[in-house]
Amino acid sequence: MQASNGERPQDPNARRGRPQVVFLCQRVPWPPDRGDRITTWHFLQHLLARGADVRLGCFVEEDRDQAGVAFLASRCREVVAPRLSRRQRRFTSLRGLLTGEALTLPFFRHPELRRAVDRWTAHQPIDLVYVYSSSMAQYAMTAPARAKVMQFAELDSDKWRQFAARSGPLGRWIYGREATRLLAFEDRVARTFSRSLVVSEVERELFTARIPGVVPDVLPNGVDVAHFTSAGDGARDPHTAIFTGVMDYEPNVDGVLWFARACWPALRERFADARLLVVGSKPVPRVLALAELPGVTVTGRVPETPPYFDRAAVAIAPLRLARGVQNKVLEAMSMALPVVSTPQAAQGLGAVPPGTLTIADGAPATIAATAELFADPARARRVGVAAAAWVREHWRWERMYDRLDALLAELGVLHAAPPA
C-alpha cells in the first residue's frame, strides 16, 4: 500500500534557485514523538524553511502514520510512503541469508520506494540526497545528485555487535553476522556519499576506527527548549522518578527492566511512597508487567511528556545498550529535572559541567544517586535548574541548524546565510 500526494506540477520559474532535495528516512517524520522522528522532522523542516523543494521517501508502519503523511504532503513536493509491516518484513529479511547481505537491507527494501527514487533522480537534477539511517542508503547508492549526505547518527552495525555480546550462542551468531555484513555496507555507503554525519564525538571515534579513511562530521540532536519547559508550579512529587521512551525499543526495554529489578526494590524500601513513571508508547508485555510492582505506573502512549516530567523529581536513563545523544536525557534536563544516567546514555553529550548530570555506573551507584535526590528536593531542584540552563545554551535545535547550514554551504547546496 502506497501513501502519496502525487508529485505536483512544477513551474520551471518557481524552481529556479530552489534546492531540489530527496529526503529518505525509515519512519514518517511526523509527529516528532520518538528519537528518530524528532531528528528527521527537525532537519526536514529546516530544509523546507530554507526554501528546499523536498521529495520525501519513508514508510508507514501504523494507521496513525497516514495523518503524518497528509501533513507532510502539504509541505513537500511529493511524499511516497509504502506500508511496512515489521512482522511480515522479518520473513522478507531472511532473503539476506541467501544473498549474503545484511538482513536489515531486504527488511527495508520496497519496490514502490525504489521506483520513486529512480523517478525523482532521473527526471530532474537533484541538488541533495539526504539519507537518515544506513538502511535507507540502498535507495541512493547509484542515484545521480550534486551531493549526497548520509546521516548515520550511529553505526547501526555496532548495535548488533552489542546485542551479540549479550546473547547466547544462537544470538551471537545471528547478531554477529548482522554486525559484520551491515558494517561492510556502511563502509560502502561512507565511501560513496559526499559526507557522512554522526551524532557525537564518541561516534566519530568509533566510526574512524571501523571505517578507516573516512572522517565524518558531527551533527548532534537538539532539543525543543520551548516545548520542554517546566510549568514551574511546584507540584513535583519529591519521591517520583520517570523514564521516557518508546517501550518496544530493546535498549529502552532492557534499561527500564534492569532498573526495576536491580534498583527499584531498594528505593522502595527506603522511600515507602516512591513512584516510578514509565512513560512511552508501545509497551511490550515485559514492560506492562512492571505495573505489578509496588509504586510503578506504565502509561503507554501519552499526548505529550512535559506534564509527566513535571510530576517527577528525578529522571532516570538506565540504558546499557546506548551510545549516541539520548533525546530522553536532553528533554528531561530541559525540563529542569535532575537526571541519573548510565555512562552509556551520557557519553554522547561529551563534557558536562559539574552539578548538571549525575552519571552512575551499576546498581549501587544508581540507587545511591537516586536516593540522594529523593532525600534532598532542594538539591534536586538546583541540579535541574543548572541542567536546563546548560541545555538551553548548548543543545537547542537552532545550533544544530547552523552546523547543517555550514556543511551544506561547503557542498554548494545552500548559501551559508539564510535567505532574507
Image (tube, grey):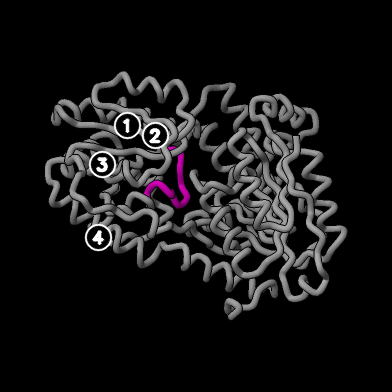
- From the image, which quarter does the C terminus lie in? bottom right
SS state under label 4: helix
Residue at mark 4:
386
Measured from the top left, where is residue 388 in percent x and y? 30, 59
Q: Name the residue under label 3.
A: 311
Residue at 74%, 76% (x, y): give it: 17
Q: Can residue 102 be seen in this view?
A: no
Q: Are marks 1 and 2 in contact (CB under 8 Å)?
A: yes
Q: How crowded is mark 1: few (under 14 residues within 10 Å), some or many (20 or more)?
A: many
Q: Distance between the residues labelled 1 and 4?
A: 25 Å
When the figure is inspected, residue 353 is found, relative to residue 59, above or below; the finding is below
Badge 3 crowding class, 10 Å Cα cut-off, few under 14, some 14 to 19, many 20 or more, is: some
Residue 322 magenta: yes
Quadrant in the picture for residue 313? top left
* Quarter of the rendering containing residue 135: top right
Q: In this view, does 24 lie to the left or right of 254?
A: right
* Mark 3 residue element: loop
Determine which residue is flagged by label 1: 259
Q: Is the magenta stretch mostly helix, strand or loop?
A: loop
Indicate the position of residue 409 as horizontal and vertical percent values: 64, 75
Q: Is there CB contact under 8 Å for labels 2 and 3?
A: no
